[in-house]
Amino acid sequence: MSLQPQPWPEVPLATAKVARKAFRKGTPAMRIRDELGPLFTDEEFAVAFAARGRPGLSPGQLALVSVLQFAENLSDRQAALQVTARIDWKYALGLELDDEGFDHSVLSGFRARLVEHGLEEKVLDLLLARLSELGLLRAGGRARTDSTHVLAAVRSLNRLEFVGETMRAALEALAVAAPGWLTGVVEPGWDRRYQARVESYRLPASAAGRAELAVTIGRDGFALLTALGAADAPVWLREVPAVDVLRITWIQQYHRTVGDGGTEVAWREDSDLPPGRLRLASPYDLAARYGVKRGSGWLGYKVHLTETCDDGTPNLITNVETTDATVTDQETTPVVHGHLAGRGLLPAEHAVDTGYTSTELFLTSAAEHGVELVGPLRVNTSWQARTPDAFDLSDFAIDWNHQQVTCPNGAVSSSWRTEKARGKPVLKVDFRKVDCTPCPVRARCTSSATYARKLTLRRREQHELLERLRVEQATDAWKKRYDRRAGVEGTIHQATAATGLRHARYHGLDKNHLAHVFAATALNAVRLDAWWTDTPTGRTRTTHFSTLVSTAAA
């Protein structure tokens, strides 16, 4: 399939006449065409198509179809049907009324080309560039970011189910790729254990029975891998993706030792498993990981949405980040700033919650990007900070020039040294036991019965910033300023309700990131339509009982 770029088609007279007659007030699809014009041109997608071959459909039109598809949370079949049946979609695409549309599989192929050629961000970039031209976006304003979980399009399996399904998936793939070879290596019992998906049969109820089944499946997998590695096995079978998944899974989940009594297979203990960021969780989606946030766990991904929040302009999503479920929000902060800088849309103020902040990020965001992070610091969890009248770090006088610390009772520290904590340099300060032991206020300073007080300090610029922010964030002025961040919660809700953001449509990180970019672009289109039509934003809903109680209290 080749691309022969064509100008964005004008709206046919018949299509325009019928559309304006049928929709006197217009529709979002029609207003996108009228207000933004030829947004997605074929030339922008030329790198994803060959120069020779049978001409394909316009990628610019397919991009607009994809945005409209996500705006209404439609499947590929439903979206293709809308192109054939919807007059307002034909108007937006510049199609004749009798245009027959295309087969739904074209949309899947289009997305695959975008992912293959690294064009996942293209539709959002083009929309944001057009809005910048119209004056609806600018750098140096305010922005806010938050994340939500995304459930992978696979079942969440426990370890036993996972290894059983991984073995079955490998056998399924080999049964198609080399049925004759597989027939010669199948062992007794495999037909009973791996004919059906693992969720279709009942696992042993006892812990001993489950442990025995886990070891049995482990032996089966090693037997298959041994057969695949034999000299008479076709070499290319080892490159089958499902076999590669089996090999990695068995390394992660099992021990195998060879001794005088033969080969022993053992189920790895939890403490011996690889870290969650590296551990496979499904044989069908290799990028999905199991994550936990605020006590809730899920298998899949996280998506981070950044939007503008300036007065006088619509709130528009300017960046989308998709990560696996184990990546922390804090790791994403510099990535967001880097991508916003690339688009020329860095804000002056960036409102985030605690997950995105640290003393180091407060400094680096300002120094590297000129962005002021506006977000709460992490709570001081030391018992001194939580106990009234106890001496926490703020009660100690620090002399940075002479590298000394004076305690509230007047004792001076005995040592000052640099160490590493979690890979980052910190300062360790010790006091003398001879000073701390007889101290009359010792109980307010340390809970140790024998040891002297010890302090851990950040670098000077970090420590001074931390102390300044703690004071600043206790003021009403800062709290009022931070209130602006709450609006991003509504964005997450709108994205979930309108585009189905919390449920992955596809397998793999790249494909799901593309889906999230389409969803964000579609959400921007919805908000632009509301802006153009002066539609007020929805008010926070309250129950009748809450209203009654509030009124009575007033």
Image (spheres, helix red, strand yellow):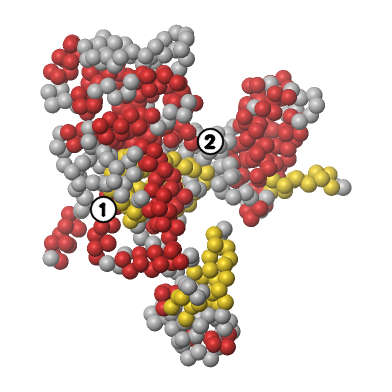
Q: Sequence-wise, which precedes: disc 1 or disc 2? A: 2
Residue at 65 percent across and 44 percent down: it is 252
Quadrant in which residue 279 is drawn: top right
Using a 10 Å C-alpha cutoff, classify the residue at mark 2 as few (fewer than 14 neighbours), some (14 to 19) or many (20 or more). Answer: some
Distance of mark 1 from mark 2, alpha carbons?
37 Å
| Relative vertical location of residue 226 with respect to residue 53 in this rendering, above or below | below
Q: Which element carries disc 1, helix, strand or loop?
A: helix
> Would you say residue 79 is visible in this rendering?
no
Disc 1 marks which residue? Answer: 484
Residue at 41 percent across and 14 percent down: it is 3
Q: Which element carries disc 2, helix, strand or loop?
A: loop
Q: Residue 406 location, x and y as percent? A: 47, 81
Q: Residue furthest right?
A: 260
Using a 10 Å C-alpha cutoff, classify the residue at mark 1 as few (fewer than 14 neighbours), some (14 to 19) or many (20 or more). Answer: some
User: Disc 1 vs disc 2: which is toward the camera?
Assistant: 1
Q: Residue 482 location, x and y as percent? A: 28, 57
Q: Residue 246 location, x and y as percent? A: 65, 36
Label 2 amino acid? Asp
Label 1 amino acid? Arg
Quadrant in which residue 222 is drawn: top right
Disc 2 marks which residue? Answer: 285
